[in-house]
Amino acid sequence: MGVTEEELNFLRFYFLNLKIASKAVRVYFDYVHPPAGLAGELIKSSVTLKGLRFMTKLQLNILYPSPGQSVTSADFDTTLTVCLLRNLQPRESASLTGWDNLPPPGDTSIGADLTRVKWYRNQSVHSKDGILSLTDFNKCWGDLESAIGRLSAKGGVSMIKETQLAKHVVLEGSLKDMLLELRSCNKSQQELTEKINNHQSALDVLMTNKEEHEKKIHQVHVSHQKGEAETQKLSTELSDYKTEYAEKLKACKNDIKKNEEIIKELQDQSDKKQNKIADLILHICKLEIKYEQHDKMLKEHDEHLALLDGQASKQCEQMAQHSEQMAQQSEQMAQQGEQMAQQGEQMVQQREQIAQQGEIFSVFSCFVLQP
């Protein structure tokens, strides 16, 4: 089944988000938080980061890897990078419209540009139809391209040329299929992350309920120990409380265990999706290098053709000049032929005159020679 021009526009814009915009955010992040001191900054801010409700276990594993492993911004996706820029000192300020809304074109602050990258990325991942009209494509591309230019320039790198090349990247064959699959994986991974966050919230509520139930049971035990005179009454209450809250506690523990199992399963699925995304990005990078080499060969071929075309044009000019010279020579020869023909006629006339003169001379001689 063929891909429409609007679908290709969407894939090109998705490629810009995936390959160029994420790199621009990382360039700016490395400028604000240099790689050499990143691990130390993360350790200092561990309480803050680990206390964030939306921070997933996978993200924390990336930020705080096993001993002997290093942490680098190359392992951060756009969401995590923007999250760190918002929560590590010095914290980035939100745009006038907040972190979750597309800023107006006039707002060119760093916070606004980070929000643009994050907003367009989420829109690309969650888009249902996966199409962009030419008008929307040019508008969105221009807005995101400007943000990429400002963020990368702030980090000391110019990425405008990369965005211009990406706008004309040839999306066909493997690259197109990989982008479609990668978008599907990103969408699934995003949905898994949202499910994990929802279950984590539910788990937090269950843990709170569990603590309250245990506290009430403890209070009943304390009351029972204090009131010997009301032993029978308290015993009955204790029995009722124990039965009621023991059942609630058991159900709560079961729910906690179930949610923990669901979270683990979702986390495993998310990890697999993340690994698949990393593999696809690696393949896309390899394909991009291949396409760059192909474009370079085409450019060299075009230059060679242009050179041959120039040489052919010169040869044509020379042949035209030569033809003109031959035409002039032919005209001169024709003129010479006419002149020779005229000379031949003159010679014939002269012969006839000589012949006539000879006849006259012969007649004259006969008269003169008679005795």
Image (cartoon, rainbow, N blue to C red):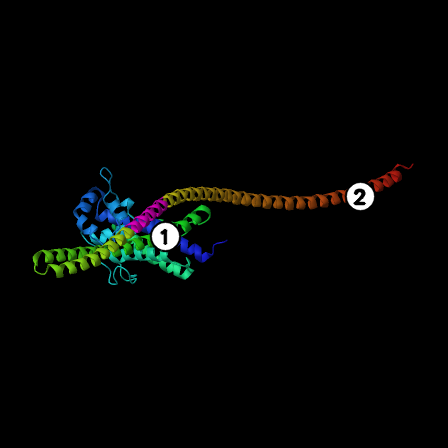
Mark 1 vs 2: CB contact within 8 A: no
- Three-letter amino acid code of the residue under disc 2: Glu
- Which of the 4 image quadrants contains residue 233? bottom left
| Image quadrant where residue 315 sits | top right
Task: Please state which of residues 103 and 149 is positioned toward the viewer in this rendering.
Answer: 103
Check disc 1 and give the amino acid type.
Ser
- Compared to residue 60, the image places residue 115 above or below, namely below
Please give the name of the residue rendered at 38% of the width and 54% of the height, measured from the top-left corner.
13
Vertical placement of residue 100 versus 186, above or below: below
Q: x and y percent of residue 36 in the render?
A: 21, 41
Magenta span contains residue 262: yes
In this rendering, the count of numbered labels is 2
Residue stretch rendered in magenta on the structure: 260-278
Question: What SS does tag 2 mark?
Answer: helix
Q: Is residue 262 left or right of residue 128?
A: left
Residue 39 in the image: x percent, y percent? 20, 43
Task: Look at mark 2 in the image and give the residue it sits on.
Answer: 352
Q: Position of residue 223 (x, y in %)?
A: 10, 58
318 vs 35, nearest the viewer: 35
Q: Position of residue 151 (x, y in %)?
A: 27, 52
Q: Which residue is mark 1?
A: 188
Q: Is residue 318 left or right of residue 53?
A: right
Q: Which circle, 1 or 2, is nearer the viewer?
A: 1
User: Visible in this render: residue 161?
Assistant: no
